[in-house]
Image (cartoon, rainbow, N blue to C red):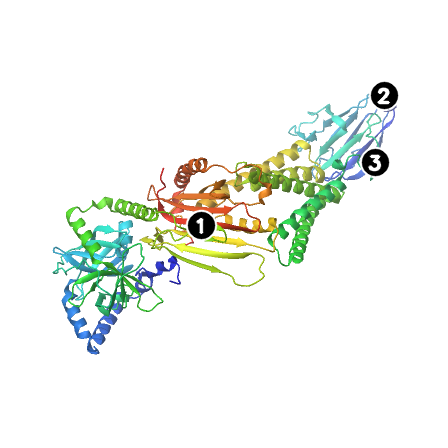
Amino acid sequence: MKFPGALITALVLHAAPVIAAEPASVATDAGKAAAVTANTVAPATSENARDVLARVRPAVIQIKGFFGANTAQAFHGTGFAVAEGGVFMTNYHVVAQQVQYPDKFRLEYRTPEGKTGKVSVVSVDVRHDLAVVRAVDHSPAPVKLVPAIPVKGERAYSVGFPLDVGLTITEGVSNGAVEDSFDPRIHYSGAINGGMSGGPALNATGHVIGVNVSGYRFEQLVSFLVPAEHAQALLRRSLTAPPDDGKRRNEVQTQMRGHAAALLGALKQGMPTQAVAGYRLPAKLAPFIDCNASGDPTPNQPVQVTRINCSAKAGLYVEQGLYSGDLRYSHFVLSTDKLDAWRFVHRLSELASATGAYGSRRHVGPFSCENRNLRLTGFDASVLVCVRSYRKLEGLYDFTVRVSSLNGVKRGFASHLDMFVWISMPA
Amino acid sequence: MTAEANAGYAVVEVMDTHERVIARERIALTADKRTFTVGRSMQADIIIGDAYCAPLHVAIEIMPEGTVRVSDLGTMNGVIVMHKRYVQGGLPGAAQALEVPEGRLSIGRTTLHVRTASELLAPEKPDRARSASPLRDPAWIAGIGALAGGIQLAYSGWLGAPRDLATTIATMLISGALAAGAWVAVWALLSRVMQGEWRWLRHAAIFLGVAAVYVAIDSALELGWFTLGLPQWSTRAAWIGVFALGAALYLHLLHASSLSRRRAAIIACIVLMGTGGLGHWLQARYQMRDVNYIATTVRIYPPLLRLRGPDTLANFFEDTNKLRDAADAKRKAMRSEDDEDSDHF
């Protein structure tokens, strides 16, 4: 993958800012027109899509979020009935603002026929980006969940309300589970656009194989689904032991902690190293970590630099402006045959300090740092550790480390490790 | 002395607010007339054109032994002796027989220096003579300071710019010289206004000397951290800078104005505490507002400069565990206004 983990931020199907600007009525009319066109110009394969949509249509709702008493929506997504009594499945990121700020946001549903009513959040699964919600006065027959990963090449459909243009079905194929991903995802080669989040992805028999969750915005039809087994697990959990209304945010906190623990646990299985210019440095610490190496091939540079960037791509959407839970590390190996010791280590110094953190003061406090010269295996290094704590989620910290070699005057390295998120350091 | 003063004369120097002598009056003294008056009117023995003075402001008496006494003749603004104002609310004669040390007093916006035959004169000042010690010679101090500052600028340019070194160093030296020149010019101008002398060399010596000491201490501490493992102090440069500013200010004030040592020290201290405290507060606020700011910077020097061995991992981890509490404390110190969305998102 050519793109670093930051791109995933763009994946979250959260079309809010653009869509919210349009008047609701206009958006709805456009949606109907689009739906009609799709039906009239249907090619042969879409006979199946028509059947699938007809079967799932009564169970699908659009979920809309409103800020305060406004009647213009703030964000919107899709949901589908999974149990009797108006129980619907959607994405956590569709309802996240309401979970985090229950006094500021309210949720409503809108059926494809235009019926509206209130929605409340029952339970969330931040790790898998799922949420169970309950709709008032709307209890369609639930659709069936199939807790198995479909094989590559199997026909699949995705249903939702993309960009607020009305109920839509897209057709594609499943490409099985995403390889080497920390969070389990099904790779769906079909269109998923903003607003379809939380909608059902179905097989040819009209059963749910997953929940629409994300897609690469500037690529071609590389989209992702949360496997149905996780939806089933959350449903079972929320029907047997739904959390108290007031504790939903604590639930998010606990789940973020669980995510961090799982991420660290996955790394603990040995510490593979790689030899880079005479140093043994941490390599791909787990199968799901993406590493790429680069360097400037220009000859006769004063300092030759080899860069290795690794990312766990394990970040989670918590709320607007807070996308967290990732692990990244980089190595910069420097060598010179032109510079003297003073100027060479000065170059190294420039990489030895910590800069470039990102985060909002709404979510985190300032950094506290400790810097020391330490003996590591085979060499001495300057180690800088900086920690900051999350403001509303106690016990969770951002953690950033810089390790720079001190011995070499012709070659040396600087390593950066950032766990910009939720790491509760072991005491 | 006494006999001379008895029947001799006194000289009164009339000075403006910058203590420039604008008139020098010779007053003849006899055994029975030892008093003269100062004021705006024609009746005064010494006539001064100061709107803040009464027509007859004071009577000054030269005592036979040479001491000077002043009497307020019923004025609104009174008399200032030794930086103290004596106002009698317009009652004539209330400040009678107030002794005037060194014969210096002020009325209105005018300073009078009453000189008698008994005054002690300072010895002749050497002109352009070199001081015995280079440490006290402004030319030496300025020269050494300029050299040290130039070396420091050239070194930092050399460190960071392996290519195009000459341009970088020349640019740094020129901008450094311009900044220093501007600073010295401001103080020289103040000296010219307040003291009537430019004192270029002295102000250059103060600026360059203090700058050299600042660079030496800061570099020594930074190098000391690396070579000896001294504790890191993230606001080191800022605090040393504040103290250097205070010291420079004190010395500049002393040489550019007529302030006493005590007053110059008080002003320097106030400015020092003000800038230091304000800077500290601003930095704390800045860090609260920019949660991505990391004050600790790491500088690495060649390995031959490391005199103290590395610390153990165990010690370090023990200290890093304290970071959690430090981070929690900083988080709790944040104010509710910090809840506002930052510009980073």
Q: Relative to the observer, which residue lies in front, A337 or B88?
A: A337
The residue that mark 2 highlights is B2
The residue that mark 3 highlights is B126
Q: Subunit of mark 3?
A: B
Let me know if marks 3 and 2 both belong to one chain. Answer: yes
Q: Residues within 10 Å of mark 2 (few under 14, many from 20)?
A: few
Q: Subunit of mark 2?
A: B
Q: Relative to the observer, which residue lies in front, A35 or B11?
A: A35
Q: Position of residue A177 (x, y in %)?
A: 26, 60
Quick check: B220 left or right of A75? Answer: right
Q: Amino acid at mark 1?
A: Leu
The residue that mark 1 highlights is A281
* Contact (Cβ within 8 Å) of mark 1 with mark 3: no
Measure how far apart labels 3 and 2 are at the Cα level: 31 Å
Quick check: A135 left or right of A179? Answer: left
- Under circle 3, the secondary element is loop
